[in-house]
Amino acid sequence: MNIFIDARWVRTDYHDGISRYTAGVVQGFKDDNIPITILIYDVRQLNLLPDNIPYVMVNYPVSIKEFFLARKLNKLGADVVFSPLQIMGSNGRKYKLILTLQDIIYYRHPKPPTGMSLPIRIIWRLFHMVKWPQRWILNHADHVTTVSHTSKKFITEMKLTKREIGVIYNASSLDLPTSTEGVVKTKNIIYMGSFMPYKNIEVLIRGLEFLPADCELHLLSRISDERKAELEQLIKPGTKVVFHNGTTDQEYVSLLQSALCLATGSKEEGFGLPIVEAQTIGTPVVINDMEIFHEVAGDGALYFEADSPREFALQVLKLYEPDVLADLIEKGYKQAENFAWGKSARVLYQICEQLVAKK
């Protein structure tokens, strides 16, 4: 069975969410010795992908040449092609196609991600104002996948596709520390993620006034000057917020190891990867009480109401009790075992087998 994975959304400099997800799926296939071929458009993408994976150079995904991609894949003998997004040329294909809708966040929060040009922002908003374009795209596939059962439920409720929907979980790709030697524990609270309005960073900042002064909030991700200025206005005297404006994976792991907890008040997620990353390392998580986070974190987390800074602080204070802390760490380790790239790759491979059997 010739399986092709579209890796053209992998970045050439550093991973974003889709880039890391793609690399993780590819790593899962490699770890299980399942042969695949990846599609790239720039050899620099190989720097962020697992080594020694056969690849084919094709066009940039947003190109007129995309209309002819399927014919090339036909000639290459593709049986199944998997895309980590829902955008892929398929005119004239003779293979089975699996498309991915990661989540439905932008139907509820249609503001485009930063960095897009004005024409793309306009198209983005128009696309998410109605559902039929998404349906039209997804129904061109033979199978649709998403990253959680919660997202699957929402996609089904919104009737975004008539295709069967599979769940290919996200997982941590961080290199686990081999030792805790030299780690100095702090009362720091870690946040990893974007600063879009629905991420609700504000509740974490406001919650600091109800916590001891040694509780610092560390915001790790890249942030625009404008958004930073907005958040700085919320910082109360006597509280401390540190803006890292980006960290390496090694720095991220180090900060997690020394932290009291990772926290998020996000009101919308398709998965919530930082939760798994923290639990895998043994860092407790304090998170918004919503359905997707219960699916991901299980009983290995403390939950709070997203609009209550005081309740957030009360949950963090529970971690000052050694028994609570130890119990949460143990439960977090166990919960994180549910998410591994090898498991995700095997689920995807089973879907591929089923599609080819129907061919």
Image (cartoon, rainbow, N blue to C red):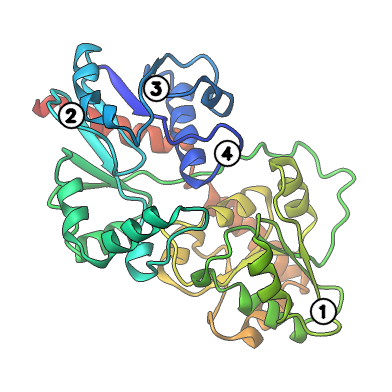
How far apart marks 4 and 1 lie (CA) works out to: 33 Å
Q: Who comes first in sequence, dot 3 or dot 1?
A: 3
Q: Quadrant of residue 287?
A: bottom right
Closer to us: 13 or 202? 13
Q: Who comes first in sequence, dot 2 or dot 3?
A: 3
Would residue 249 be found to the left or right of residue 354 on screen? right
**Residue annotated with mark 2:** 96
Kind of residue sitting beneath label 4: Ser
Q: Position of residue 298 (x, y in %)?
A: 49, 62
Q: Who comes first in sequence, dot 3 or dot 4?
A: 3
**Residue annotated with mark 1:** 239
Q: Are marks 1 and 2 in contact (CB under 8 Å)?
A: no
**Residue annotated with mark 4:** 173
The answer to whether any part of residue 164 appears in the image is no
Q: Is residue 325 above or below residue 275?
A: below
Circle 3 SS class: strand
Residue visible at 37% across and 63% down? 106
Would residue 86 be found to the left or right of residue 19 on screen? left
Kind of residue sitting beneath label 1: Thr
Q: Position of residue 331 (x, y in %)?
A: 59, 58
Q: Are marks 3 and 4 in contact (CB under 8 Å)?
A: no
Q: Quadrant of residue 242?
A: bottom right
Q: Residues within 10 Å of mark 1 (few under 14, many from 20)?
A: some
Q: Is residue 243 above or below residue 29?
A: below
Residue visible at 54% across and 50% down? 336
* Eye-nearest disc, 4 or 1: 1
Which image quarter holds the N terminus? top left
Q: Residues within 10 Å of mark 3 (few under 14, many from 20)?
A: many
**Residue annotated with mark 3:** 38
How far apart marks 3 and 4 lie (CA) works out to: 19 Å
How far apart marks 3 and 1 lie (CA) works out to: 48 Å
Kind of residue sitting beneath label 3: Ile
